[in-house]
Image: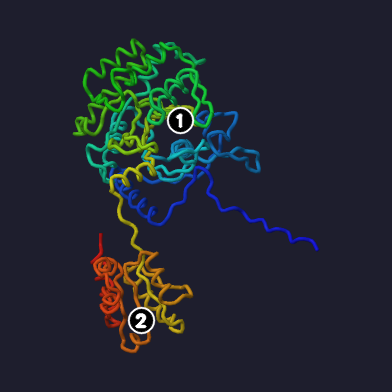
Amino acid sequence: MSKKNKIRRPKARLPKGMKDGEASEIRAMNAMLEKIRTVYELYGFEPLETPAFEYSDALGKFLPDQDRPNVGVFSFEDEDKQWLSLRYDMTAPLARYVALNYDRLPKPYRRYAAGSVWRNEKPGPGRFRQFTQFDADTVGTPVGASDAEMCMLMADVMEAVGIKRGDYVIRVNNRKILDGVMEANGLADDENAAKRLTVLRAIDKFDRLGLDGVVELLGQGRRDESGDITPGANLTDRQINSIVNFTGWGEAHSSSQSNFGYDEVTFANFEESVGTTEIGLEGIADLKTIASLCRSANYGEDRIQIDPSVVRGLEYYTGPVFEAEVTFDVKNDKGQVVQFGSVGGGGRYDGLVARFKGIEIPATGFSIGVSRLYTALQALDQLDDQTRGPVLVLVMDKERTADMQAMTFELRNAGIRTEMYVGGSGMRAQMKYADKRAAPCVIIQGSDEFAAGEVTIKDLVKGSEMSKEITDNKEWREGRPAQFAVKRDELIEAVLSVLKRHEA
């Protein structure tokens, strides 16, 4: 007799670099997003949705590797042999949208967008392959007021979600200044373009790798804990020292301790670093304009600071760059006390739309890392409590399910979030279910209550609080704390009273 073929079942497993979102987190996240959306709307930005994937050539040179379109991003070929890629940010799709609709859009065009983005990169603690960004961008405006406005917008968002002044700072720099530094170090010609990008990406990893790790990436390269090697920029020691000193990570001061601000000393240091390079001096002038506009609107150094260590890693930034940093201390995976770090950033990208139109269309924007901001609010205990479940109507007699359903709809029509138990279990299991659903109260109408024209309401929140004070089981059974009966036509008023009692 032959053996029966073994049934092959798929293994239930979560893909690396991905995470599931559960009800309480989703609701708290949505409440946070609504606060951000309110600020964006207050500033006059309009919503826009773009597809999850774009043609890979629309992302163009900003892919990590043009010849390998599935490296850095997730890509596939369609039936026409066209490469498509999941978006790695919300900005490249915006550039395509503006180019496609340029003639009918108002200029400047101001939009906000929230959605998932994907990175085909090695996952790690706190680093996911799918995450959410919430962006605001202004397209069709030169350097100046629009960049200053982005800095003010970021500061207002931080406070709107519950991060107090003093627990965050908006840090601002200009990529033109770093370009001037690299030009002064002989890295300006076309043959050094790839090397300059490697430098930018290395500096952008300072918060994660520290000074030693960045120096390795500026030099010969770096081997991580798993043995994987990231090629370096192969700069000379002189070039490395010049860049490290400019960004504020020399022996004299560390980035976590610096407070550069708007003082003239900072700009004098910038001028010394860029020398006579035209692009470097232009970047300094841009920063002075932004600083002046922010100060005139009463956004002081306690909220917005000039900081040369901010570079942002993406290649398409062409001018001012911004970063929102949460400054309170937390413990990292190794138990070390560190500053929480960045929760978002952005900058000016004057060349991105030009790839489609052939003319320069200046733009500036800011992106919030939603998961990072959510984690920061968790650490500050500033998330809205979204754990309360629905009122639960129990079904004591299956023959009267229709009556219970009618009661459920009555509660819903009164605006009360309500669920009728639709399982097949008895009273004890239904109460356990109510606990797991975090129901604030349950509605019971057995045969005795029905005959008397009443319903029984169990206030589970109050009952849980009282149970902590009652140690005798008999006292609990006889007292039946937080349980009361009302007339059937008083149900809505009674339930609303219970819910109001437990409002956060």
Q: CA distance from mark 1 to mark 2?
A: 65 Å
Q: Residues within 10 Å of mark 2 (few under 14, many from 20)?
A: many
Please tell me whether residue 145 is drawn above or below residue 18 in the rendered image.
Answer: above
Please tell me whether residue 363 is drawn above or below residue 488 in the rendered image.
Answer: above
Task: Report the front residue among 173 and 149.
Answer: 173
Q: Position of residue 59 (x, y in %)?
A: 52, 34
Mark number displayed over residue 445: 2
Q: Position of residue 96 (x, y in %)?
A: 48, 37
User: What SS does tag 1 mark?
Assistant: loop
Residue drawn 31% across the image and 69% down it: 460
Q: Give the residue type that dot 2 points to.
A: Gln
Q: Give the residue type that dot 1 points to.
A: Leu
Residue drawn 42% across the image and 55% down it: 22
The first of marks 1 and 2 along the sequence is 1
Residue drawn 28% across the image and 41% down it: 158
User: What SS does tag 2 mark?
Assistant: loop
Residue 472 quadrant:
bottom left
> Which quadrant is the C terminus positioned in?
bottom left
Drawn side of residue 115 relative to residue 44, left or right: right
Q: Position of residue 350 (x, y in %)?
A: 41, 28
Task: Report the front residue among 158 and 60.
Answer: 158
Q: What residue did someone put label 1 on?
A: 352
